[in-house]
């Protein structure tokens, strides 16, 4: 690598009159990082083909900026089962080492194991990232060569396959002195129990990102207590993903019937992203002892068909300090998504920051549990966007208790529709209406309804028919003294 840095031409000093020479280092770093994140086929191009060399070869200044931010720009030399060119030169250099032994379906042997062993035992102080998965035989070898300290290790992603239940050695990545890990990002996947990995999680006190993908056999009646204990030792945690595959009926989990006292609740003050997919009962038991007031990005998907328990989830959500401006509600096939948006999200139409979802065969009780869990947040929402899948319109119109559902949004001023089911929305708004006063029982603050067009119907006469379907509702609101404007969006 050092030899490569002595090429001809790229070290030539550039004219001081060029504007690019006056760009501050921090701005250059942002540009480099933007370029990195936009690289297609990232693992192959950036980590194995080293396209970042192109930037490093421009001039000394660019190289200095890049090499001062090795972690952020994910710079390093990848060591894996395929032999790279000049492997001895690479291992003898000073670059961070990225271990990548994923998708290993056969036993690691020969030169492939030699590279792994040399990198992990002789150069453990340079290893910054490890990605490893496999069956028992490969993990037995892996644990043998990782019983020392890895002071530079920041990222660890391991996946246990074929039902392998690991016994992670106490010395794993910590050495005989059992030093705390310096890990920042950790990903664990496989059908393992929380008990088997809890000791390792307890040593990862510097984590900022945690991803756990486990099947439901990992959880027992005391699982949420074990997980909370581990989370309590991660004060810097910012992103937490917990994905649970449902393989069968889940045993009842212990969950306090009354809210815990403040001293019993684990506070994750820096957590800004929480993603959960799995049984609803597990989530409610977990958040019973958890508080994350700084949350911004939230995605919750209940994989079971039961009505989600919301006692503790309601308290957990109410403590989030973010102010939400709009609701995005979609009924698409067998999926029900309920999202909260801050005003910036709504204007820019970027990704949804807060989403609750129900999987297949959701019930009326399950649907109504969603606004119940979000009740403290809904009173401030001013816009409601509804997407109805045309193929399920008849089922949705009669299955969901819309009157009771819409009563959860007392301050919505604008209702916007998508999906081309505007006539259905018109009927829903007048559902069980008993007169002018009764029409204000749902969406009393409503001022406008923006209709989305069906992309399959562009006939102007069809638009007239859809507008006419709202005339009874418009008239009823007019008589009640709270007029509503109905129009097609641009």
Image: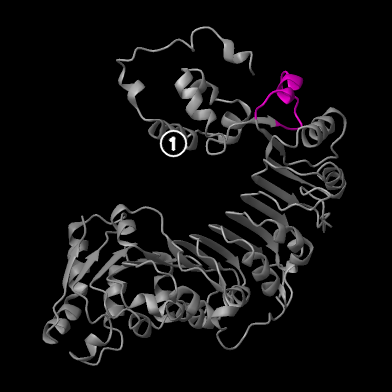
Callout 1: SS: helix
Residue located 22% across and 86% down the image: 440
Q: Position of residue 328 (x, y in %)?
A: 37, 65
Q: Position of residue 275 (x, y in %)?
A: 54, 61
**Of residues 120 and 110, which is closer to you in this image?**
120
Q: Which residue is under mark 1?
A: 34
Residue located 41% across and 59% down the image: 352
Q: Where on the picture, by quarter, is residue 477?
A: bottom left
Residue 136 located left or right of residue 13: right
Instruction: Please say whether residue 158 is one of the residues in the magenta stretch.
Output: no
Q: Position of residue 36 (x, y in %)?
A: 49, 34
Compared to residue 316, the image places residue 197 above or below, namely above
Residue 123 located left or right of residue 335: right
Could you classify mark 1 by the number of other residues whose Cα lies within 10 Å: few (under 14), some (14-19), or many (20 or more)?
few
Q: Which quadrant holds the N terminus?
A: top right
Q: Is residue 306 visible from the viewing direction of this image?
A: no
Which of the colour schemes (rainbow, by chain, secondary structure, one colour) is used?
Answer: one colour
Q: Where on the picture, by quarter, is residue 237?
A: bottom right
Compared to residue 111, the image places residue 448 above or below, namely below
Residue located 56% across and 57% down the image: 236
Q: Which quadrant holds the C terminus?
A: bottom left
Find the residue positioned furthest to the front.
177
Q: Is residue 105 visible from the viewing direction of this image?
A: yes
**Of residues 404 and 154, which is closer to you in this image?**
154
Q: Which residues are magenta?
A: 79-95
Compared to residue 185, the image places residue 123 above or below, namely above
**Of residues 115 and 150, which is closer to you in this image?**
150
User: Count of labels shown?
Assistant: 1
Compared to residue 310, the image places residue 339 above or below, namely above
Q: Where on the picture, by quarter, is residue 22?
A: top left
Q: Position of residue 439 (x, y in %)?
A: 22, 86
């Amino acid at each position: 690598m050092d030899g490569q840095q002595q090429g001809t031409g790229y070290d030539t000093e550039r004219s001081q009159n060029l504007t690019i020479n006056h760009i501050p280092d921090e701005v250059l770093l942002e540009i480099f990082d933007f370029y990195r994140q936009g690289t297609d086929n990232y693992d192959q191009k950036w980590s194995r083909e080293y396209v970042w060399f192109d930037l490093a070869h421009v001039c000394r200044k660019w190289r200095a900026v890049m090499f001062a931010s090795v972690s952020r720009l994910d710079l390093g030399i990848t060591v894996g089962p395929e032999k790279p060119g000049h492997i001895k030169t690479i291992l003898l250099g000073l670059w961070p080492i990225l271990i990548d032994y994923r998708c290993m379906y056969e036993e690691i042997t020969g030169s492939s194991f030699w590279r792994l062993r040399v990198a992990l035992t002789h150069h453990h102080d340079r290893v910054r990232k490890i990605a490893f998965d496999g069956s028992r035989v490969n993990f037995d070898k892996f644990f043998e060569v990782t019983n020392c300290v890895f002071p530079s290790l920041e990222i660890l992603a391991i996946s246990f396959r074929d039902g392998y239940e690991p016994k992670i050695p106490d010395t794993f990545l910590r050495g005989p002195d059992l030093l705390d890990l310096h890990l920042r990002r950790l990903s664990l996947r496989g059908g393992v129990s929380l008990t088997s990995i809890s000791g390792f999680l307890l040593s990862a006190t510097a984590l900022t990102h945690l991803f756990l993908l486990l099947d439901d056999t990992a959880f027992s009646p005391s699982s949420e207590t074990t997980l909370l204990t581990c989370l309590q030792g991660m004060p810097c945690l910012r992103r937490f993903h917990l994905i649970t595959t449902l393989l069968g009926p889940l045993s009842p989990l212990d969950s306090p019937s009354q809210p815990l006292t403040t001293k019993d609740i684990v506070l994750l003050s820096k957590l800004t992203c929480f993603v959960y997919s799995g049984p609803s009962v597990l989530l409610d038991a977990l958040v019973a002892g958890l508080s994350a007031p700084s949350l911004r990005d939230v995605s919750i998907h209940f994989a079971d068909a039961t009505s989600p328990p919301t006692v503790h989830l309601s308290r957990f959500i109410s403590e989030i300090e973010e102010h939400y401006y709009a609701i995005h509600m979609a009924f698409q096939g067998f999926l029900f998504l309920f999202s909260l948006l801050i005003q910036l999200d709504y204007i820019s139409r970027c990704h949804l920051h807060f989403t609750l979802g129900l999987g297949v065969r959701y019930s009326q009780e399950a649907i109504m549990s969603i606004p119940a869990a979000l009740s403290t947040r809904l009173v401030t929402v001013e816009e409601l966007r509804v997407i109805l899948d045309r193929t399920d319109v008849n089922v949705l119109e009669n299955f969901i208790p819309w009157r009771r559902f819409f009563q959860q949004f007392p301050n919505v001023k604008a209702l916007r529709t998508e999906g081309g089911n505007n006539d259905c929305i018109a009927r829903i708004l007048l559902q069980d209406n008993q007169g002018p006063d009764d029409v204000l029982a749902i969406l009393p603050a409503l001022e406008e309804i923006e209709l989305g067009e069906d992309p399959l119907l562009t006939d102007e006469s069809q638009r007239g028919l859809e507008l006419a379907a709202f005339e009874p509702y418009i008239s009823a609101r007019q008589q009640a003294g709270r007029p509503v404007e109905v129009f097609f969006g641009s």
